[in-house]
Amino acid sequence: MMTEHEKLLAGQDYDYRDPELQQLLAQGRKLVNLINTTQDVTARADAIKALFGKTGHGFVINGTFSAIYGKHISVGDDVFINGNCTFQDSNLITLGDRVIIAPDTKLYCGAHALDANKRFGSRPDGSKYLITYTKPISIGNDVWIGGNVTIIGGVHIGNNVIVAAGAVVTKNVPDNTIVGGVPAKTIRLLAPLS
């Protein structure tokens, strides 16, 4: 039988009240708060390493940051995340090397049913619970994500990609592409990196 955490990562209906998930949530809130409030550079760096599942060399968060679990996020080398970014990591979020993320960008792994009748379930005791389904987000190497971008769960962004400011990315983006708009569409192709 799968744990609630395993169900979450598998994109199945899960119970967020599960003690393991609640412990992960509490730890995530504590570390995010420390990252966003401490003036101690060493304490902030330690909190960033403790929050994330994996951090590469040269990883920088410039300003405030928000995540739910944190442990579901893996970051490559030389990644720069600017202020006021939100990673709703109810599934895995993977950033490759040399990723730049501008301010106010949101990565949302969770979603709910289109049918309103299927958004809440009932527990054996009659209480209701919100049904959330999750999908991972992956971002390749050498990617620049502009300000105020939203990326939806299930999306893979390839290598050498630019996502224009304000875009909403709902579908995979191939390598060597600039995308923009709502929903994001190809604007033009880029020369492959040598």
Image (cartoon, rainbow, N blue to C red):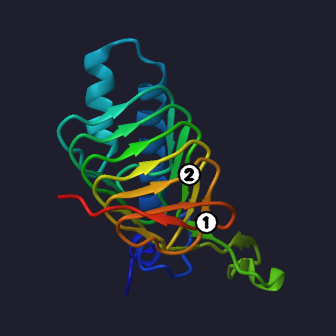
What residue is rendered at 52% in x and 45% in y?
146
Q: Quadrant of the C terminus?
A: bottom left
Percent x, y for residue 131? 66, 75
Say what amino acid the circle numbered 2 marks. Answer: Ala
- Which quadrant of the structure image shows residue 189? bottom left
Identify which residue, 94 or 175, lies in the foreground: 175
Q: Secondary structure at mark 1?
A: loop
Say what amino acid the circle numbered 1 marks. Answer: Ala
Identify which residue, 31 or 54, lies in the foreground: 54
Residue pointed to by mark 1 = 184
Residue pointed to by mark 2 = 164
Work out which residue is located at the far right of the displayed protein and give it. Answer: 116
Q: Quadrant of the N terminus?
A: bottom left
Percent x, y for residue 47? 32, 31
Q: Is residue 165 left or right of residue 50?
A: right
Work out which residue is located at the far top of the displayed protein and give it. Answer: 39
